[in-house]
Amino acid sequence: MTGDPFKCRCVLCHDYGDRGEADQMDLMINSNVQQHGWHVAMVPEDEVGPGFAYTIGLAHTHGVPELAMFGLDVHAMHRMLNILGDKAAAGCVLESGQEHHDVVDGYPVTLKSADRRWYRTFFGRAIGFYRRPPLPVLQVAWPDVEGCFHWEEQADQRHRESQPQLWLPPADHPAGVWTAEL
């Protein structure tokens, strides 16, 4: 990853003078990135909204975008993000617009570029790792059992609300659980 801006600016490669202040989660993230190439942060579902998970370290280790997934069980999303992470580690270039058919049994997932204005809302630990917003993040969108994605009119209301549309600027996103904190 010669010349990659993440390589030199993350907390693994540069001492910012505050390593002694790292909490247990920061230490675990650093250890997982060193050992496995990335970490998957999991935010479980709660009374506010659905759970989500995202990678930290894929850009540092493999020069590919970080990945984020929403609306499923966090452990299932962890496994799915690891499948895509393994593909990146094997040399697959992950890009917006791609479909991957080997992540969710029997269904494709679609990768979509996240608008940077969402980063502080969802990816705080990644920002802490990189010491700035990670660039870029791809949302891993999954379809319902009928094969409809959450932005399609045919998708039922529950599925449309299970995942945000991070490719939209927050001001253009439909009001709902994903915009309640904005």
Image: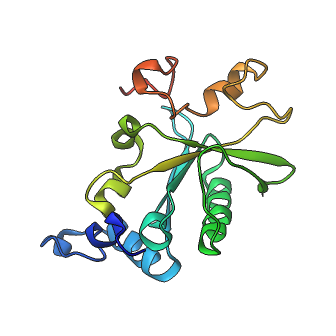
Residue 65 in view here: yes
86 or 99: nearer the eye?
99
Residue closer to the observer: 10 or 19: 10
Q: Which quadrant is home to the N terminus?
A: bottom left
**Which coloring applies here?**
rainbow
Quarter-wise, where is residue 169 in the image?
top left
Q: Is residue 159 left or right of residue 126?
A: right
Q: Position of residue 86 (x, y in %)?
A: 64, 70
x and y percent of residue 88 in the render? 61, 67
Name the residue located 37 percent from the left edge and 67 percent from the top edge: 4
Give the answer, above or below, for where 171 lies relative to 12. above
Residue drawn at point x = 42 percent, y = 26 percent: 170
Which residue is pictured at 50% across the width and 57% down the height?
Answer: 65
Left or right of 170 on screen, residue 128: left
Q: Please indicate whether residue 90 sits to the left or right of residue 7 in the image.
A: right
Single out the residue that lies furthest toward the left: 17
Q: Residue at x 65, y 75 (%)?
A: 90
Q: Against 18, is 141 above or below?
A: above
91 or 123, nearer to the observer: 91
Question: In the image, is residue 125 above or below residue 120?
Answer: below
Please say whether residue 44 is visible from this viewpoint. no
Q: How many marks?
A: 0
Name the image quarter holding the C terminus. Answer: top left
- State the residue lying farthest toward the bottom: 35
Percent coordinates x, y for residue 30 in the rendering: 37, 74
Q: Residue furthest front?
A: 3
Q: Quadrant of residue 22?
A: bottom left
Residue 127 position, x and y percent, is 32, 54
